[in-house]
Image (tube, grey):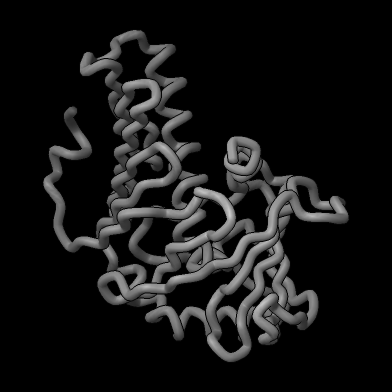
């Protein structure tokens, strides 16, 4: 599992603004498929209106204010709590219940906290981010899923965004469900085989949107997902 999680430090920077800003998708077929998918998942208006999301991923617990970019990452394995605004990169870091004051160490951990958030959030909200600025989206082919159903395969590549722009993804959107049903992660663009191939299962309505909870075959699924309209602001400012 460690190799998969390490490989999956995602390339896309997930926008923190409440208003999505789409890049221009030149591939009209791909754009149409994504639009049908977004509609099936509740619509971008409802995603933008979603204020707070909390979830667990592997050994971390995250809280995210989508409107401000404030993020709280609890990392029990190192007894750390990182409070970082992913837009300004300002924040605080606690270790063993004590606030760190060493500026160099704090800044390094704030950066690590943002990278954790990029990775962990992408495992949860990737379908909503397919048209973010810096993402190149294209239709690849139609293929069969393991369950025998048909899916449209979209390729994602990245230009000047994220922490690993050499990655690419193939995203399988079911023709019947209009939902992402599988994704393939390629560590390098020219790789012939994916680093991993995982289903996206168990969609549930959270607030006004759909989110997928299961990534079968290894324990790297988002867990304990909560969508809220309000959250104690102290969660992002203090231990």
Q: Residue 234 appears at what percent x and percent y?
A: 13, 38
Residue in the foreground of this view, choosing between 22 and 168: 168
Q: Position of residue 9 (x, y in %)?
A: 59, 42
Identify the residue at horizontal 69%, vertical 78% (top origin). 145
114 up-or-down from 23: above or below: above
Quarter of the figure that contains the C terminus: top left
Would you say 174 lies left or right of 113 here? Answer: right
Which residue appears at 85% of the width and 51% of the height? 191
Which quarter of the rendering shows the N terminus?
top right
Q: Position of residue 132 (x, y in %)?
A: 55, 62
As drawn, is 87 to the left or to the right of 186? left
Q: Is residue 97 above or below residue 63?
A: above
The residue at 22%/38% (across/down) is 236
168 to the left or right of 36 = right
Residue 26: percent from left, percent from top = 71, 75
Q: Is residue 194 visible?
A: yes
Residue farthest toward the bottom in the current orientation of the protein: 176
Q: Look at 38% across and 21% down and name the residue there.
A: 78
> Closer to the camera, 1 or 16?
1
Furthest residue toward top: 102
Asked if 58 appears above or below 52 in the picture, the reply is above
Nearer the observer, 15 or 72: 72
- Picture quadrant of residue 35: bottom right
Position above or below: 120 against 140 = above
Inspect this view and state whether residue 162 appears. Answer: no
Quadrant of res 70: top left
């Amino acid at each position: 599992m460690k190799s998969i999680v390490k490989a999956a430090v995602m390339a896309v920077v997930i926008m923190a603004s409440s208003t999505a800003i789409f890049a221009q998708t030149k591939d009209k077929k791909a754009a149409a498929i994504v639009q049908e998918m977004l509609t099936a998942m509740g619509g971008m208006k409802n995603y933008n209106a979603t204020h707070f999301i909390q979830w667990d991923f592997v050994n971390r617990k995250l809280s995210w204010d989508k409107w401000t970019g404030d993020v709280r990452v609890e990392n029990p394995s190192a007894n750390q709590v990182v409070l970082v605004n992913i837009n300004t990169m300002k924040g605080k870091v606690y270790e063993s219940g004590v606030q760190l004051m060493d500026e160099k160490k704090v800044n390094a951990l704030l950066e690590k906290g943002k990278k954790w958030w990029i990775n962990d959030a992408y495992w949860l909200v990737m379908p909503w981010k397919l048209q973010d600025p810096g993402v190149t989206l294209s239709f690849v082919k139609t293929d069969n899923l393991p369950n025998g159903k048909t899916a449209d395969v979209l390729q994602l590549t990245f230009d000047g965004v994220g922490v690993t722009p050499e990655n690419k993804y193939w995203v399988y959107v079911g023709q019947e469900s209009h939902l992402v049903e599988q994704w393939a992660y390629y560590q390098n663009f020219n790789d012939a085989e994916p680093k991993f191939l995982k289903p996206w299962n168990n969609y549930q309505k959270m607030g006004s949107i759909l989110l997928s909870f299961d990534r079968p075959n290894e324990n790297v699924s988002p867990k304990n997902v909560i969508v809220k309209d309000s959250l104690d602001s102290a969660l992002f400012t203090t231990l």
